[in-house]
Image (tube, rainbow, N blue to C red):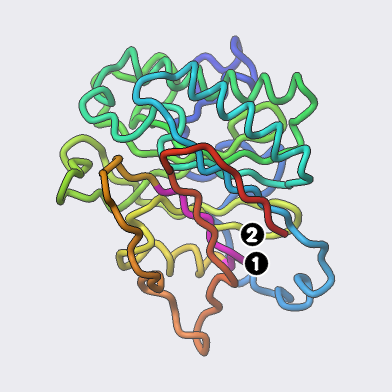
Amino acid sequence: MTGESRAGRQRRDPAARGPGSGRDRAGIGPGSGGDRRAGRAGRLANMADLRIALAQIDTCVGDLEGNADAVLAWSRRAAEAGADLVAFPEMTLTGYPIEDLALRGSFRRAAWDAAADVASRLAQEGLGGLTVVLGTVGSAGEGRALVGEDHGLPTNRAVVIADGAVVASYDKQHLPNYGVFDEFRIFEPGSEPRTVEVGGRTIGLLVCEDIWQDGPVAAVADLGCDLLLVLNGSPYEEGKEAPAPTSSRAAPPRSTRPSPTSTWSAARTTSSSTAVRS
């Protein structure tokens, strides 16, 4: 990766794509679905609980520093509550929706640095063992020097932070283009599934619209994930009501392919709160 020898692990690319973008903490998918599914039921039965904190915070569009500070503050609270993993909403660091701000190379580079800084500060505070999943803007270019250059459109990205580095990333595949949403024009869709290992469990990552459409859920199920973690965000709308609960799309038949055991969602709200469950 361009510049990694100079910057070190704290500068690892939050925009790194494909398999192998950091295996320091755990195995990162894609991988062999058959290997992951072997002995899955017995493994889970003998495993300690995984505690997940959902940091459903309100963020400010463009305020990278303020949003990063909020991530740190709520990560501390999650760690104090005994969480193994804390999940933040879609595009946490950048705010949502950022519209054409995503097309500015300088902003994407600053978002890159903000994610690396969060990872470094967590480690300095002794919180490197906490897995943090948050949203930001990615880039088709690999290496910080290429962010914002002529290397394709930005991406709507989820990143995984652990042990002082950004260790994995996932790009949203289905980009909404209805109502107030204009993501299809702004972002480049992702194409690869992503799983991460936390506390011996395989977690599949998705972003918002991906759970409503065909393909992404089945893809992470094929990798043998134990649960889904879905980052969501939605623009503020006065009088907006929550939609009725629905099942994720393309969940495979149990007779042919194991489905994730549960789905967790971190969605942006208009007030700061966190829910910690075991």
- Please provide percent x and percent y for residue 220: 49, 63
Measure the C-alpha gap from mark 2 to mark 1.
8 Å
The residue labelled by disc 1 is 36
Closer to the camera in the image, 52 or 217: 52
The magenta region covers 224-232
Residue 52 higher or lower than 107, as above or below? below
161 relative to 36, above or below: above
Q: Which residue shows up at 50% across the image and 49% down it?
A: 266
Q: Residue at label 2? A: 202
**x%, y% of residue 14?**
49, 29
Residue with the most extreme top position: 6
Residue 227 is covered by the magenta coloring: yes
Q: Reply above or below: 61 against 191.
A: above
Q: Main secondary structure of the magenta part?
A: strand
Q: Earlier in the sequence, mark 2 or mark 1?
A: 1
- Residue type at the position of mark 2: Thr
Query: Is residue 131 located in the magenta-colored stretch of the structure?
Result: no
Q: Nearer the viewer, residue 233 or 133?
A: 233
Residue at 78 percent of width and 71 percent of height: 43
For numbered disc 1, what is the local secondary structure? Answer: helix
| Front: mark 2 or 1 | 2
Residue 48, image quadrant: bottom right
- Circles 2 and 1, Cβ within 8 Å, touching? The answer is yes
Left or right, 170 with respect to 23, comes to left
- Looking at this rendering, what residue extends furthest in the bottom direction? 255
Badge 1, how many Cα within 10 Å: few under 14, some, many 20+?
Answer: some
- Asked which quadrant contains residue 39, the reply is bottom right
Give the residue at x 72% y 54%: 51
The one nearer the camera, 7 or 74, is: 74
**The C terminus, quarter of image:** bottom right
Q: Nearer the viewer, residue 196 or 4?
A: 196
Which residue is painted at 15% across and 49% down in the image?
A: 179
